[in-house]
């Protein structure tokens, strides 16, 4: 049962959409419901020991899980499809923008910023295609971004924040370091972001 | 419009806009225009509030425009002197094809992202190489087969030769043996045995086959009282070894031409 669950989780993780406990129960655990937590625990252990992956619950109310990489970072090229790479590049930029601007930004602010990088919501992008869809749907479904409507705004405006997957997969310190590297400055240049990142 | 630009603490756009509105209001004489003016004031005060918020913001000033420019540099933009808008390229430069890939490679270093799981067998990624191997193998296989077909064919012919010979030899041995079984103490005249009264060629063939039997020690040729050769099958095993050795030492040349045969 444990190995079945491990396989199930690995396959489900391909789309990077969080895995629901209900799905786990329905597809793998089924009649062994009572042993559920034991099975999940053991599966988590296997994932860690065999694959170096961590099974993390990102929503304790709705019981959804994601897999993250628990191995120490290595120098050198990462084995990854180009498409994936490019999306992660865009994502990092968005997350950086959000953090540096105080952890929450308005949609208009973000898109105005992306304009500067030749990324337009209404226009088909050479690399990303329908960027608006990628950002507002795919990234949100994967829990990298969280988009919530701002009350009392007309026309409706939204605020963009880091999603729970981002919180687990990357740290504020990492992001600040990335920004610093790109801008050729020391991370302490932005003192308040620095103190928040170090906290 | 350009909300972000107005929010920029360094910009006076908001003040300018307000001043412009003030000036415009002097020319207002219709209710609708007054309503528009009121709407504008609401917007302006909202922006003013946000601007105030930004000032009190915990974050140190972050210049997103500078960040964007540094990003473009990082991605490898080729900055040109011209400011013409060339198709997809914005003013100020040309982004290379791998710009976002470059960005992504850097980004991957920061994420603790679980690699996407693929089955080693039959995953989409490995599909292209597999047909290639198959093609190569097929080529090799078909080539091998062709080559093999040749020697196989030749082999077959040879075998059939050999087989035919062996069969004949066996047949003759059996005949010899049967004869001896029936009449154990009368060796057969060699000539009686091999000569085919109807065919010279057959006769020669028979002699040819008999020579095999002699060579293999399965039969023996002796000279009888009349100095005519007689043939008899050898007894299996036991004395066989010695006999075959002895037999091998003797070479007999028999000349037979058609006239004699007749």
Image: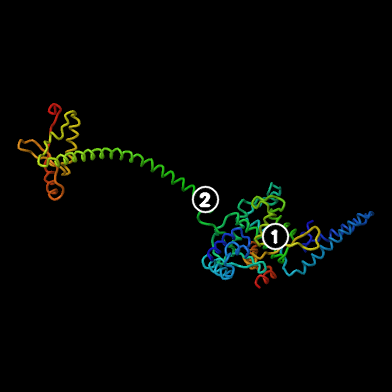
Q: Residues within 10 Å of mark 2 (few under 14, many from 20)?
A: few
The percent position of residue B36, horizontal first and vertical second, equals: 88, 56
- Left or right of A5 on screen, residue B224: left
| Disc 2 chain ID | B
What chain letter is assigned to the residue under label 1? B
Q: Which mark is residue B66?
A: 1
Does dot 1 land on a helix, a strand or a loop?
helix
Q: Residue B126, percent across and down?
A: 52, 52
Q: Is residue A186 visible?
A: no
Q: Say which residue appears at 53% left-offset and 54% top-offset.
A: B123
Q: Earlier in the sequence, mark 1 or mark 2?
A: 1
- Quadrant containing the C terminus of chain B is top left
Residue farthest along the front direction in this orientation: B182
Marks 1/2 in contact by CB < 8 Å: the verdict is no
Q: Tag on residue B160?
A: none
In the displayed structure, does residue A100 sit left or right of residue B133?
right
Residue sitting nearer the eye, B151 or B76: B151
Q: Residue at x 56, y 57 (%)?
A: A80
Quadrant of the rendered image containing residue B247: top left
- The residue to which callout 2 is attached is B127
Q: Nearer the viewer, residue A162 or A149?
A: A149
Q: Position of residue B4 (x, y in %)?
A: 76, 60
Q: SS at mark 2?
A: loop
In front here: A187 or B108?
A: B108
Q: Residue at x 20, y 39 (%)?
A: B169
The answer to which quarter of the image holds residue A156 is bottom right
Q: Is residue A195 depicted above or below A134 in this figure? A: below
Crowding at dot 1, Cα within 10 Å, few <14 / some 14-19 / many 20+, comes out as few
Q: Is residue A116 above or below residue A194?
A: above
**Farthest-out residue, left:** B225
Q: CA distance from mark 1 to mark 2?
A: 44 Å
Residue A62 relative to residue A54: left or right = right
């Amino acid at each position: 049962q444990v190995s079945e669950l491990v396989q199930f989780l690995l396959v489900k993780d391909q789309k990077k959409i969080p895995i629901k406990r209900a799905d786990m129960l329905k597809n793998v655990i089924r009649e062994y419901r009572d042993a559920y937590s034991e099975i999940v625990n053991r599966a988590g252990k296997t994932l860690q020991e065999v694959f170096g992956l961590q099974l993390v619950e990102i929503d304790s109310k709705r019981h959804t899980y994601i897999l993250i990489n628990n191995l120490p970072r290595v120098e050198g090229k990462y084995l990854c499809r180009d498409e994936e790479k490019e999306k992660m590049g865009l994502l990092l930029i968005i997350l950086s923008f959000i953090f540096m601007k105080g952890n929450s930004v308005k949609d208009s602010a973000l898109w105005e910023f992306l304009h500067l990088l030749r990324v337009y919501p209404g226009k088909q992008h050479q690399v990303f295609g329908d960027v608006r869809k990628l950002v507002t749907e795919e990234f949100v479904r994967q829990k990298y971004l969280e988009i919530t409507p701002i009350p009392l705004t007309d026309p409706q405006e939204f605020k963009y924040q880091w999603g729970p997957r981002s919180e687990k997969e990357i740290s504020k310190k990492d992001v600040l370091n990335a920004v610093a590297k790109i801008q050729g400055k020391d991370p302490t240049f932005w003192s308040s972001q620095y103190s928040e990142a170090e906290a | 419009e350009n909300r972000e630009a107005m929010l920029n603490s360094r910009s006076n756009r908001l003040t300018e806009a307000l001043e412009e509105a003030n000036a415009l209001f002097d020319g207002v004489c219709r209710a609708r225009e007054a309503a528009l003016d009121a709407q504008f004031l609401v917007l302006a005060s909202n922006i003013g509030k946000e601007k105030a918020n930004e000032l009190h913001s915990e974050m140190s000033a972050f210049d997103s425009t500078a960040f964007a420019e540094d990003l473009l540099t990082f991605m490898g933009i080729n900055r040109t002197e011209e400011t013409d808008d060339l198709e997809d390229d914005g003013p100020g430069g040309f982004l290379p094809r791998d710009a976002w890939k470059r960005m992504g490679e850097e980004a991957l270093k920061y994420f603790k992202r679980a690699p996407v799981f693929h089955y080693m067998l039959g995953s989409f990624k490995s599909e292209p190489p597999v047909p290639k191997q198959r093609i190569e193998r097929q080529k090799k296989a078909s080539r091998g087969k062709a080559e093999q077909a040749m020697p196989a064919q030749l082999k077959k012919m040879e075998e059939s030769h050999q087989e035919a010979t062996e069969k004949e030899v066996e047949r003759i041995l059996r005949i010899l043996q049967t004869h001896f079984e029936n009449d154990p103490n009368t060796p057969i005249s060699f000539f009686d045995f091999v000569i085919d009264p109807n065919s010279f060629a057959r006769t020669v063939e028979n002699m040819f086959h008999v020579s095999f039997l002699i060579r293999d020690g399965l039969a023996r040729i002796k000279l009888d009282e009349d100095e005519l050769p007689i043939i008899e099958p050898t007894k299996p095993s036991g004395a066989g070894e010695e006999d075959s050795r002895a037999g091998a030492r003797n070479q007999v040349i028999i000349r037979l031409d058609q006239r004699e045969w007749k």
